Image (cartoon, grey):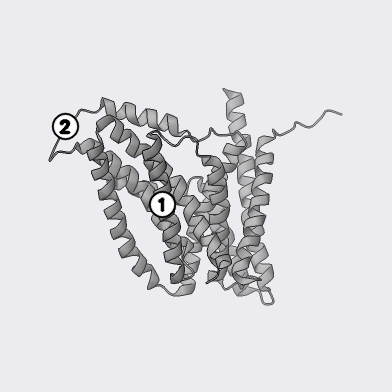
Amino acid sequence: MTWIELAPTVSAAFLASLVECVEAATIVLAVGTVRGWKSAFVGTGLALAALVVLVLVLGPALSQLPEQALQLFVGILLLLFGMRWLRKAILRGAGIIPLHDEEAIFKSETANLKLAQTTERWGVDPIAMATAFKGVLLEGVEVAFLVLAVAAGSPALIGPAALGALAAAVLVTVAAVAIHKPLARVPENTLKFAVGVLISAFGIFWTGEGMGIEWPGHDLALIGIAAVLLGASLLGVRLAASPARPMEAR
Amino acid sequence: MGTLRAILHEIIGLFVDDGSLALALVVWCALVGLLMLTVSGVTMAAAGAALLTGCVAILLVNVVTAARKRRATQAAH
């Protein structure tokens, strides 16, 4: 397998996971800062264990499906997922809806955690543990789905896609440990824009393959589809940003 | 139970945020698939182009409509 074939899968898994890991890190940081790091780490560890079980159960189950049915099923899910991100990124880019603010989310989470009563069971705070568990599990489910989905066309791609996701998790963890603050400087909307384009491109590609379409250039068609989506999305930002002009009176 | 419900809600929310966008995309994919099955002589390139341009058009119409609605709501307040 060449780098040209691997690059779209690995970069989609890495960028999508980066966004999700930043969101999970904000919650874990809030829990650790307010309620103690032990509970935050126990909750995170349990969520990661639950995710491993989920992937170990779902991965082989998905591989039992016929290839074309799997491509169609995963393709439509990826298309819906990617277009949802792209829509939000376009509307945020056009200033129609506010940008995602990690700092504000961190403040809101810490305020909620400060209000909750402190209890302790087996040396951990159940509320803190459950908050970290839920946050990491919810964002992790998205990462797990994306890794399995972008590699849907070939089991050989699951390893590289998982490595892309792991690299993002390591990068975010190192950054969060180093600065001890929410990673508010990550250009979240730009990342979501790029990931939306990539995931939607995968969605259209796999949906087409599942329908029996043979794309010109095979895997290389992904790059063309992504280029069309990028151009259309930039146009979408301009169209959404410009207010409708009333018809001039003659 | 609350956590399970939140997870289920989150999983559905992964794919459906604006219901009309999701529905339009699924319907368009079904139409292209139906076209390929029923109409003879549809080339692979034409089917692929139809799938891509349809999805792009649906996205653009959706964002422009959403932006107009948002502006109209803000103007009303």
Q: In the picture shown, does residue A212 fall above or below A135?
A: below
Front residue of this view, candidates A179 and A57: A179
Horizontal relation, residue A64 to residue B33: left or right: left
Q: Amino acid at mark 1?
A: Glu
Please tell me the numbered disc located at residue A119.
Answer: 2
Front residue of this view, candidates A152 and A164: A164
What residue appears at the point 42 percent right and 45 percent down from the top-left corner?
A172
Whichever of labels 1 and 2 marks the residue nearer the N terminus, that label is 2
Picture quadrant of residue B6: top left
Please tell me the numbered disc located at residue B31.
Answer: none
Q: Would residue A14 be visible to someone looking at this image?
A: yes
Q: Secondary structure at mark 2?
A: loop
Please tell me the numbered disc located at residue A142.
Answer: 1
Picture quadrant of residue A165: bottom left
Labels 1, 2: one chain: yes
What residue appears at the point 53 percent right and 34 percent down from the top-left corner?
A99
Q: Amino acid at mark 2?
A: Thr
Q: Position of residue B47 (x, y in %)?
A: 65, 68
Q: Which chain does tag 1 point to?
A: A
Q: Position of residue B73 (x, y in %)?
A: 58, 29
Picture quadrant of residue A177: top left
